[in-house]
Amino acid sequence: MISFDEPFLTITWEPEDRIICAQWKDQVGGEVMRRGLDAGLALIVEKQARRWLVDSRRLDAIDPVDVKWVNDNWIPRAVAAGLQSMAFVLARKIVMQLTMKSFIARIDERELANAYFDDLDAARTWLRGRP
């Protein structure tokens, strides 16, 4: 079920596995990016979702200001709303892979279990095994 769909991001609810999937389709940042992530946060609350799948394969770069906002603002709110696990499918570009790995390393594993993958199937399989 599509919950949010813009040229830069599609967020879907996968009821069979109780997973929210955020598929980044184009470069984005600032308030537009935040609006998309906040729509996903509303879905976490609505569905009492515990699992989030990030498909970042099409991203080229993320502004450090946006990374900081996600780490300092969005992640704590998502955890407070009940999010427990995030799986990241890494971008194809090496620079973006390094950025994502650095971002993921800052997430407190005690609050939010997380892992990164090269493909969607492996990420979904990992999330299905999470409580």
Image (cartoon, grey):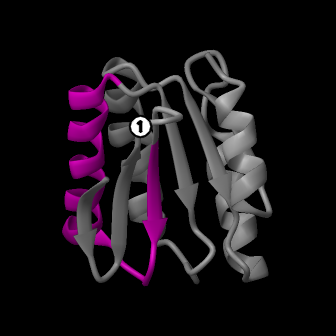
Foreground pick, 97 / 14 = 14
Q: Residue at x 56, y 18 (%)?
A: 111
Tag count in the figure? 1
**Does 47 appear in magenta?**
yes
Q: Position of residue 66 (x, y in %)?
A: 39, 62
Taking 55 as reference, is 73 above or below it?
above
Disc 1 residue crowd, few under 14, some 14–19, many 20+, Cα 10 Å? few
Name the amino acid, label 1: Pro
30 relative position to 88: left or right: left
**In the foreground, 78 or 10:** 10
- Drawn side of residue 122 relative to residue 120, left or right: right
Quarter of the picture holding the C terminus? top right
- Spot occupied by residue 3 in the image (x, y as percentages of width and height): 24, 54
Give the main secondary structure, helix, strand or loop, of the magenta stretch: helix
**Residue name at image x 78 percent, y 79 percent:** 94
Viewer-proximal residue among 52 and 68: 52
Is 58 contained in the magenta span? no
At a point 67% along the width and 45% down the height, the residue shown is 124
Relative height, residue 129 to residue 29 (above, below): above
What secondary structure is found at the residue carrying circle 1? loop
Q: Position of residue 112 (x, y in %)?
A: 57, 25
Q: Position of residue 24 (x, y in %)?
A: 46, 71
Locate residue 82 relative to residue 45 in the image: left or right: right
Rendered residue at 75%/66% (across/down): 98
- Residue position for label 1: 15
Q: Quadrant of residue 85?
A: top right
Task: State which region is magenta.
Answer: 20-48
Of all residues, the one furthest to the front in this rendering is 16
Classify residue 114 as left or right of residue 42. right
